[in-house]
Structure formats: structure tokens, C-alpha cells
Amino acid sequence: MTNKNDDLFTAVIHAGQHPDPLFRGVSVPIYQSSTFAFESAEQGAALFQGREEGYIYTRIGNPTTKALEDCVAILEKGYGGLATASGMAAISTTYLALLDRDSHLISTDAVYGPSRTVVENELSRFGVQADFIDTSDIEKIKKSLRPNTRVLFVETPANPTIVLTDIRACAALAKEKGITLVVDNTFSSPILQNPLELGADVVIHSLTKFLNGHSDVVGGMIVAREESLFKRLRKVLTLMGGTIDPHQAWLVLRGVKTLALRVEKSQDNAMKLARFLEAHPEVRWVNYPGLESHPQHALAKLQMKGFGSMLCFGLKGGFEAGRKMINAVKLCTLAVSLGGVESLIQHPASMTHAGVSEEEREAAGISDDLIRLSVGCEGYGDLREDLDQALNQAK
Ligand code: LCS
């Protein structure tokens, strides 16, 4: 399924970005300044009191960062965006802003490992309670609700299982119960899924992945649907200090310009590779939303505009064969992270999700044989050849 959304192809290049007012440079300038001069004592006071709009200090706001925030907020169809130093800074800021002492969080069990560990090991010290469950089953969410549930945190497609959660159904439940629905949209990027349009309140991105797209920057983004929520998140972010650096923001802004093109090419590769892997004699199973065999293929067609470029699979020879395979790839790189122009392969149980206990991994479907592949923008034939030779060495 190829994205044909012209609006998004235009928005990634132009949204939030205006020619430089001083010299009319076409590219947004990098305002590499920690602080901004006031015209007068009176103006400084007016800026601090919010009587005048303008920049004060880069932790609070910066023009380059603002261009990136506006761009992603427009792509996600939200009220406003907040760029952060990493995806984890976006997640921890959101938790801190929305959870109180002794409040309760419900989250997808197969989330990125640290998104779970930060709650279980750190927020628990402040009395935050949490249930990590299979959010693909709305009945399980309903059963986990408590009077003090404040946040429903959903990652769809989930890292690394590629299990989907029905965002519309979660939004309806969250609205009925007065809970804030947060969706980590990292795996889809705003090109393929817009959770705010489906009723979510907050969207999270690790900018490190598809939005930047070149495996050379770490960053994050929070987009809020409404002004009051945006202001609350902004207050916590600027106080806790997890804001992005302007140079980092500029690099992401440059990466975003090719987001639609990269997503189109990489998901085309992923669809073909998923079919190739499914038919390969050494492969036991493949999970990719574009395959008819994916249990939520119909849901993917309903809430996503394309099936993305993340997939996972297991070999007939289990992890031992998988270990041989990931050691044998030549074009794909054995590395964590995802969403870059280059294809990356990794083993979640011993890498990205090693911090999650074995029992919790098993309950979340993160089996020991699971290998995750982030498909890049290389030529399809070269990728297929590489996986084929690596699979043949895994026999
Ligand atoms: N959310 C998702 C879905 C992620 O996959 C990651 C990182 C994060 C949030 C955190 O973002 P960061 O702070 O790293 O910018 N995922 C990684 C992964 O699967 N491999 O390495 C990092």
C-alpha cells in the first residue's frame, strides 16, 4: 500500500518553515544561541510575564526548534509540538506531566524496553502504579481500569512484536473514563498514521527514527491535540530541561524533508521482503501488517495509510539459527535503532528488551527467537540477496 497523500509530501518540505527574515536564506537558520537579547528592561519583563511573544532562553524556546515543532505538529494535525533531547525525554516528560503520586497507568506490554523500565524502576518510587498488558484486546484494557487510572499509553505497531492496538477503540474508552490517551507513533511516522485524528490526546515520537531518518541524531517529540494539554506538557518540559539543542533540531528538520519519499521506498521494500521471508524454507513465522497472515491486517488497513517498514520473524532453527543469521548479514547492519535509510537487524531479547524480565518478555510475546528488521531504502534485490545468503548460513 503506497502512500499517495500529496498534502503530506508538501508538508514535510514546507510546514512550519519560513524563509530567514534577515537574508532570506531558504533553509531555516540554526539559531545556535543559548540566550536572546532584550530590547529594554521593560521588554524583558514583558516577555517573562507573557505579555509579549518572543525568545528568552533556549531551554524555554528557540526559533530553529520552533520550526521543527511546528512542522511535526502540522504533520500530526495537533495543536502544538515540543521537541525533546531524545524519545525517552519525550516519554518521561509526558509521564511526569500527566501522572500524580499514587495514580495508575495502563500501557502496552510490548513497548520499547526503557518506556516500561522507567515506570517500573523509577516512577514506582513516587507511588505510580502500572499495568503492562496486551492492549490489542480492548476487554483487557477495560478489566485493568482503576478509579485512579490517569493515562493509557499505547505503542502501535508495538516494538518489537508488530502487534497493533485499535486507536479509535482506545480513544472512545479513554474519553468515556476521562483518561488521557498517549500513542507512541514512532514505528509509523506521521506519514502512515495520525493518532490525534483517531481520537488520541498526545502523540510521541522518537525523532531518532523515521523523522530524522539518517541514524545520526537522537531526539524526541511530543504533540498535543489541545492547548491546555500542550501548556501543561510545555511547563514540565521546560522545567525538567529535556529540550532539544537547536543544531540537533535543524538536522532533524533537514531529515524530515525526505520523510515521505523514504517511507514510500522502505515500505515497498518491506512488503516484498515480508513475502520473501514468509516463503523461505528456513523461516517459521513473519509478522508484518501488510501480510494477509498478520492477525490485524484488517485493522492496519483501517488506521494506517501504509504498512510501514518494521517487521519481525523467527527461524525454524530458533534463536541459535537466528544468531548465525544476524552474524552473517553483509548489507544489513547488526545494530539497534530503526527508521534510518540503512537496514538494521537486531535480537530484542538480548538487546533492546534485555532490561525487561524474561517472564515479562514471554507474556508480551517477545519470544527468544524473534529477530527484528528495520527495512531501509537500499535496492530491494540487494536486500533480498543479503537475507537469503544469511538464512542459508543459518541452516
Ligand atoms: N519509542 C519507541 C517506539 C522506540 O523504538 C524508541 C527507541 C523510543 C521510544 C525511545 O527513543 P530514543 O530515546 O532512543 O530516541 N527505540 C530503539 C530501538 O528499538 N532500538 O534502539 C532504540
Image (cartoon, grey):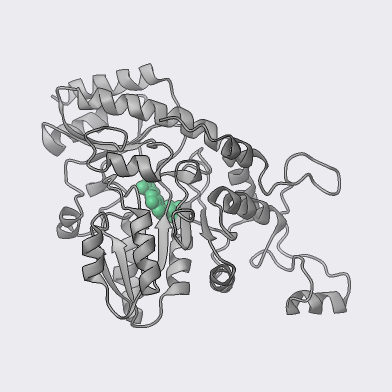
Q: Is residue 187 visible?
A: yes
* Residue 217 vs residue 165, the one in the foreground: 165
Image quarter (top left, top right, bottom left or bottom right) of the N terminus: top left
| Occupied quadrant, residue 174 | bottom left
Which residue is at the front of the view, 371 or 330?
371
Toward the viewer: 151 or 328? 151
* Side of 280 relative to 333 (left or right): left
Q: Quadrant of the C terminus?
A: top left
Return the x and y of residue 148 as percentages of the image width and height: 32, 80
Left or right: residue 146 compared with residue 172: left
Image x and y of residue 314, in percent: 18, 36
Q: Residue at x 56, y 53 (%)?
A: 77
> Which residue extends farthest right?
40
Residue 108 appears left or right of 254: left
Q: Please tell me which residue lies in front, 275 or 393.
A: 275
Whether residue 329 is visible, yes or no, is: no
Residue drawn at x 53%, y 51% as measured from the top left: 76
Identify the residue at horizontal 36%, vertical 39% (top origin). Answer: 301
Which residue is located at x 27 percent, y 47 percent?
A: 163
